[in-house]
Amino acid sequence: YQFTKITAFFCCLVCFAFPASAQFTISGTVYDSSKVIPVKDVIVMTSSGTTVITDSMGDYSIVSTDKDTITFFYQGQSR
């Protein structure tokens, strides 16, 4: 009986000692270097692997954790 109490206490302690990472929805708009024209088809990726692409107005919304790094990828055409 004592062993069960200690095991249950340890399991609770471990659960509270290592909380899950919080998740956030991050939204924004990607603009060109002039900060005027929105850029479509930019790949937005978190370090945990979630990926979205900006829409025709440059808008995106991605779910991320507090541990993630967000990276933006774009391959434009030279003029």
Image (tube, grey):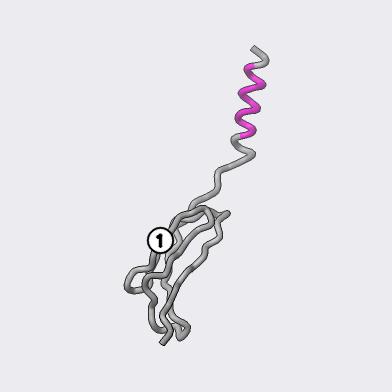
Quadrant of the rendered image containing residue 11: top right
| Relative vertical location of residue 27 with respect to residue 65 in this rendering, above or below | below
| x 53%, y 56%: residue | 47
| x 59%, y 35%: residue | 15
Queried whether the magenta region covers residue 9, the answer comes back as yes
According to the picture, the residue beneath numbered tag 1 turns out to be 52
Left or right, residue 47 beside residue 38: right
What span is colored magenta in the figure?
A: 4-14
Q: Amino acid at mark 1?
A: Val
Q: Position of residue 25 (x, y in %)?
A: 44, 58
Q: Position of residue 19 (x, y in %)?
A: 58, 42
The quarter in which the C terminus is drawn is bottom left
Pick the front one: 76 or 1: 76
| x 63%, y 34%: residue | 14
Secondary structure, mark 1, is strand
Pick the front one: 54 or 78: 78
Left or right, residue 52 beside residue 16: left
For mark 1, does the 10 Å Cα neighbourhood hold few (<14), some (14 to 19), or many (20 or more) residues? some
Left or right, residue 20 beside residue 27: right
